[in-house]
Amino acid sequence: MTTLVELTALTKTELIDKMLEGVTETVSVLTKREDGENVLLEETTKDAYGKVVGSRVVAWTYYKTGEVNEIGVVQMDALGKAVETYNVKHYLDGRQPEMLLLEDKGEAELVLGTPVK
């Protein structure tokens, strides 16, 4: 925690920076199929100055029956490099969904169908 003495020593710019520390805004773009099901979610998080601090891409695949098959998720850092990638596999036979953490960028590309940095 910052003391009053420390705050009064700050310039106006430093004080504004301190106040805006941790303030972010996330913009989401959701693409749907013709039947209304989700296909792709792209989220970009920016700080108070408009600088990208991270992003996330989520992709859905479906069984022919229309039920969710897999959900692929790639979390990226400010530079767009994949920092966490996982896949959630759903089953038609009643088993609970399973999450698989993917270590390989090639696997992340397969999940999303697009190149991953």
Image: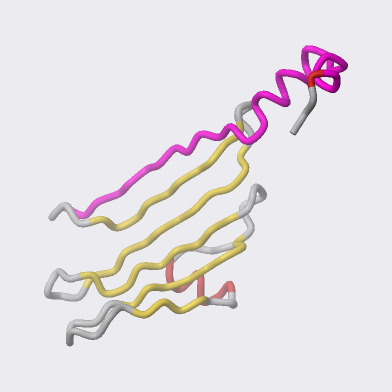
Task: From this view, report whether residue 39 is shown above or below residue 70.
Answer: above
Give x and y (percent) for residue 95.
24, 85
* Residue 71: image location, x then y, percent: 35, 68
**Going by the image, does 75 lie left or right of 81?**
left
- From the viewer's side, name the closer residue of 42 and 45: 45
Q: Is residue 70 magenta?
A: no
Q: Quadrant of the N terminus?
A: top right
Q: Residue at x 45, y 56 (%)?
A: 57
User: Seen in the image, is 77 located left or right of residue 56?
Assistant: right
Query: Which image quarter: residue 94?
Result: bottom left
Q: Position of residue 68 (x, y in %)?
A: 23, 70
Quarter of image, res 63:
bottom left
Above or below, comparing residue 104 to residue 15 in the picture: below
Please determine whether, in this image, residue 12 is positioned above or below residue 99.
Answer: above
Horizontal relation, residue 77 to residue 32: left or right: right
Residue 48: give x, y in percent of width and height.
Answer: 60, 28
Chain part drawn in magenta:
5-33
Residue 9 painted magenta: yes
Q: Left or right? Give the position of 80 relative to 9.
A: left
